[in-house]
Image (cartoon, rainbow, N blue to C red):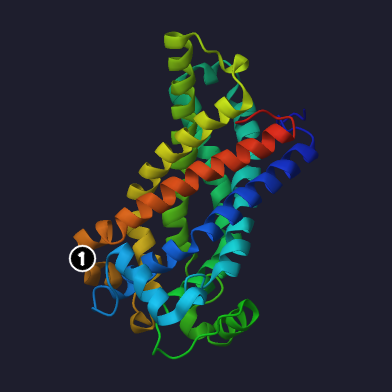
């Protein structure tokens, strides 16, 4: 290791690949839920879109067919793949750096360890969201565009070109970066700290109650713990970051052109800001987070790094 506690670069490179797979594949897999959620956040208040998940999905299928249910899947795959690459890969980098700075004795404290996990994941997410932002803005614009609105390109290249051509209006490519940071940095800190704390607690309980040591458990058993811990952490992520998620979706609505985040929040109202689309997002984020940790843990295990 270097004086900063860094390992061989190939370790971080492999972790980046695992992170890209974990985030890109999972977000693309639930894109239909994302479309219904974004449209409810952007249009339910005006009555143009149903607020419930089932009704939203049914409306998409009836009016736009199967193609409508995967609107924005490609920018979702690329954007969240890029985000995952930095989120998980740089988290490993910062975790090693901050652990070295604190020293092993300080990390015997649970509070210090949690602070280190939060700082490492939050630092990584700052860079991850810069990579995500142009794709997220484009994806949201695609998804909140309703049948009957001014047509917006469905292909990625054409959509990116349209966003760039109208950047005075869309604020492309980084107009949503601050609300993204406001949503994703706390989300990621909760996601990582919640996962690590939950996984440690589960392994402690398994050992104390059933004499099952992690080192003696099979890979499939460890990965089951990984998925469950990730799902539990995802629930807290969804609740804590719901207001910013609503604002990001509202910014994609053409009717809100030129409005500030404060104005959008005021118009939406405190209750709706915290609850609109929350049940859908809990299902979506819980599943996403559990699967992301499972994929990342599986990839690391295959690489010989252990499951978490």
Kindly identify the residue that appears in the image at 52 percent across and 76 percent down: 67
Secondary structure type for disc 1:
loop
How many numbered dots are placed on residues in this image? Answer: 1
Name the residue carrying label 1: 269
**Quadrant in which residue 76 is drawn:** bottom right
When the figure is inspected, residue 249 is found, relative to residue 162, above or below; the finding is: above
Can you tell which quarter of the image residue 245 is in?
bottom left
Which residue is at 59% across, 18% downward? 217
Q: Residue at x 47, y 38 (%)?
A: 230
Image spot of residue 138 (x, y percent): 53, 74
Q: Residue at x 50, y 26 (%)?
A: 113
Closer to the camera in the image, 111 or 184: 184
Q: Where's residue 19, x and y in %? A: 63, 47
Q: Nearer the viewer, residue 245 or 69?
A: 69
Viewer-proximal residue among 247 and 260: 247
The answer to which of 208 and 192 lies nearer the viewer is: 208
Q: Position of residue 278 (x, y in %)?
A: 31, 55
- Residue 161 against residue 279 in the figure, above or below: below
- The image shows residue 199, relative to residue 249, as above or below, that is above
Residue 237, horizontal then vertical, whole percent: 40, 46
Q: What is the quadrant of the N terminus in the image?
A: top right
Query: Would you say residue 52 is visible in this rendering?
Result: yes
Q: Quadrant of the C terminus?
A: top right
């Amino acid at each position: 290791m270097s004086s900063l506690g860094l390992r061989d670069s190939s370790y971080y490179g492999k972790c980046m690949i695992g992170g890209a797979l974990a985030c890109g594949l999972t977000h693309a897999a639930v894109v239909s839920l994302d479309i219904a959620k974004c449209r409810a956040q952007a249009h339910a208040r005006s009555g143009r879109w149903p607020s419930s998940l089932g009704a939203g999905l049914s409306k998409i299928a009836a009016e736009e067919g199967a193609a409508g249910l995967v609107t924005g899947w490609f920018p979702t795959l690329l954007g969240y793949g890029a985000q995952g690459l930095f989120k998980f890969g740089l988290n490993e980098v910062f975790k090693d750096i901050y652990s070295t700075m604190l020293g092993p004795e300080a990390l015997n404290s649970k509070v210090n360890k949690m602070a280190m996990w939060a700082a490492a994941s939050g630092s990584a997410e700052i860079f991850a969201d810069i990579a995500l932002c142009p794709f997220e803005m484009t994806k949201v614009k695609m998804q909140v565009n309703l049948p009957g609105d001014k047509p917006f390109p469905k292909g990625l290249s054409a959509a990116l070109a349209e966003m760039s051509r109208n950047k005075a209006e869309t604020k492309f490519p980084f107009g949503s970066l601050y609300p993204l940071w406001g949503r994703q940095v706390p989300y990621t800190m909760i996601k990582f700290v919640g996962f690590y704390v939950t996984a440690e607690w589960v392994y402690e309980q398994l050992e104390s109650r059933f004499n099952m040591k992690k080192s003696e458990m099979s890979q499939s058993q460890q990965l089951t713990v990984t998925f469950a811990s990730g799902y539990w952490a995802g629930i807290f992520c969804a609740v804590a970051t719901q207001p910013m998620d609503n604002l990001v979706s509202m910014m994609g609505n053409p009717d809100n052109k030129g409005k500030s985040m404060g104005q959008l929040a005021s118009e939406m109202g405190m209750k709706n800001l915290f609850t609109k689309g929350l049940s859908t997002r809990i299902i979506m984020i819980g599943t996403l987070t559990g699967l992301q940790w499972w994929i990342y843990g599986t990839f690391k295990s295959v690489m010989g790094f252990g499951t978490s």
